[in-house]
Amino acid sequence: MLDVLPVLSGDARITRLFTLVPGSDFGADAFSAIDALGGRTVPWSEACGRSYDLIVAASPKGDLRLLRGPHVLIPHGAGFNKSIHGEGSADSASGLDPAYLRRTHDHAPAALHALAHPDQIARLAAADPRAARRAKVIGDLTLERVLASTSLREGYRAALGTGARKLLVLVSTWGPESLVRRHPGLPAQLVAQLPYDEYQLALVVHPNERSLLGTYELTERLAQALDAGLILPDPHEEWASVLIAADALVTDHGSVALYYCAAQDRPVVSVHQGGGELIPGSPMDILLGRIPQLGRAEDIADALRAYRPGPGHAAAQAAFAPAGDAVDRLRTEVYGLLGLAPPARDVTPRLLPSPGPATRVPAAFDVHVATTTAGVRITRYPAGIGPPGHHLAVEHGAAAEKLARSAGLLYRRPLPASAAPVDLAWTADGWTRHALSAYPGSRSAAAVLPSGGCLLRVRGHEQMYAAQVEPRSEGGRVVQIDPAIALSAVHARLVSPQPAPDGHTVMNCLVGERAFRIALRPATDAEAAQVI
């Protein structure tokens, strides 16, 4: 609804009011979304007591017949892919169910039934021939917003903190066959399977499922994955921004995947295992029949590699009319119903907002180390979700004390500038000595400097070391790694049986498919005395 109503924006002749048709189990969060925007809501009893110049609805369900005025019915979701068990007519697509369409048509026939694809005219005619006579292909205004916002991809990724990682997005519809019901452990399994420095994960959950559980209950169920950095975007608009930012998608049979496929042809895999909800021959059925199936979280990399371009584009073509002028089409229709000339100004789709970053960022990592002829390979996983590695690397001051006491490598980052009238601060030499004394289980203590360089002290070594990682140049862009990754590589080198370097040396740190050069040398007295 909120993607559609801007076709009337900028017109002072029109007042926009919102009401909620009774009967939904998921209504509370709908009102919350309207309230967050400052929209004026009208109680249903009051809404039924007056007449309107236009009534816009996103579903034929409920007692819409009680609202007096010309009705416009707009698509809900994409593709009419699902049949809801125990609701309306058996095996009918939700949104095209004759049990609802005929009841609505008998009492308050729609002045316009807006559809997103020409094939939907035939599907509507099969469900209710009378309703089909008032149907027109308008397009999908949510898709128009997604396509209009694709140039913001880099900004969305920056807002999410994705960087050079691959963003893998899981999408779940609602109900008993959804991803979050059938595979509740999948988000945690994937964060345990995919290296933190190579992948970022997000989970898009249908508003109905979030409303049913409540945000608190949902986040408690996802606690392990959220603690490991999983992003849970807002269900109103952020979900679409995250789709644009994504590099790959894991989907059930919900229609969100069709928006992703319409905007880009990137890998998409399925976890849908069948059931009674998916409509045969629907756009999602076309997609799911042609993309790789993910059986186990351990197979995610192979499933993504198995994707071949094409199926997503074909499914999107079956769901959406050619995009580009849906706003103008709908604007012409609704102003015609209002009997008004539209304002002279053009109306374009509103750009999607930037999504928010992960609310929880891990500060302790199980670090797996492999020494190869090409360098030291570092693979990090958030602590506690998988098998232990070569060492536990923990950021002091950001992780729990229990983890700090178990750390093999303990490091700290620069603190914010102090506003104290008389300040007290550690030197790098002082803090690393203090840390090794206070945490006898740690083998190394290190400080990340504001410059990005690092100073590290190894237990039993009087010498402090300075490390600086060099950025990579890739096709006109620069790739940099978190200095904490380089610290793990240096730590692994210095605690190994190899003799410690007594001069300037260069080592390679391998992260995924990339190699980064690290300059390692003994620290000077001036560096050791730096305030951190």
Image (cartoon, grey):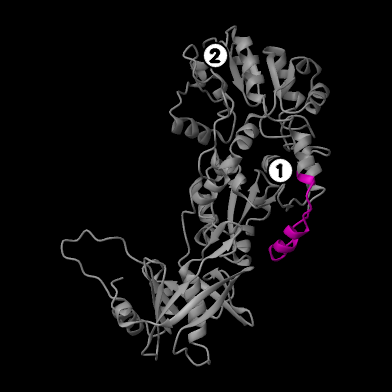
Do we see residue 408 in this rendering?
no
Magenta range? 292-312
Quadrant housing the N terminus: top right
Q: Position of residue 277 (x, y in %)?
A: 76, 41
In the depicted view, which residue is nearer to us: 227 or 521? 521
Location of mark 2 (residue): 344
Name the residue nearer the viewer: 219 or 350.
350
Asked if labels 1 and 2 touch by Cβ distance under 8 angstroms, the answer is no
Mark 2 belongs to which amino acid?
Answer: Ala
Mark 2 crowdedness (10 Å alpha carbons): few <14, some 14-19, many ≥20 = few
Question: Is 300 covered by the magenta stretch?
Answer: yes
Residue appearing at x 59%, y 26% in the figure:
4
Q: CA distance from mark 2 to mark 1?
A: 34 Å
Secondary structure of the residue carrying tag 1 is: helix
Quadrant of res 508 = bottom right
Residue at the spot 81% in from the left edge and 28% down from the top edge: 119
Q: Quadrant of the C terminus?
A: bottom left
Callout in the foreground (2, 1): 2
Q: SS for tag 2?
A: loop
Above or below 448: residue 433: below
Q: Looking at this rendering, what residue extends furthest in the front direction?
A: 476
The residue pinned by badge 1 equals 261
Q: Residue 483 location in percent, x, y? A: 46, 69
Place of residue 471 in the rendered image (x, y in percent of width and height, measured from the top left): 51, 66
Q: Which mark is residue 200?
A: none
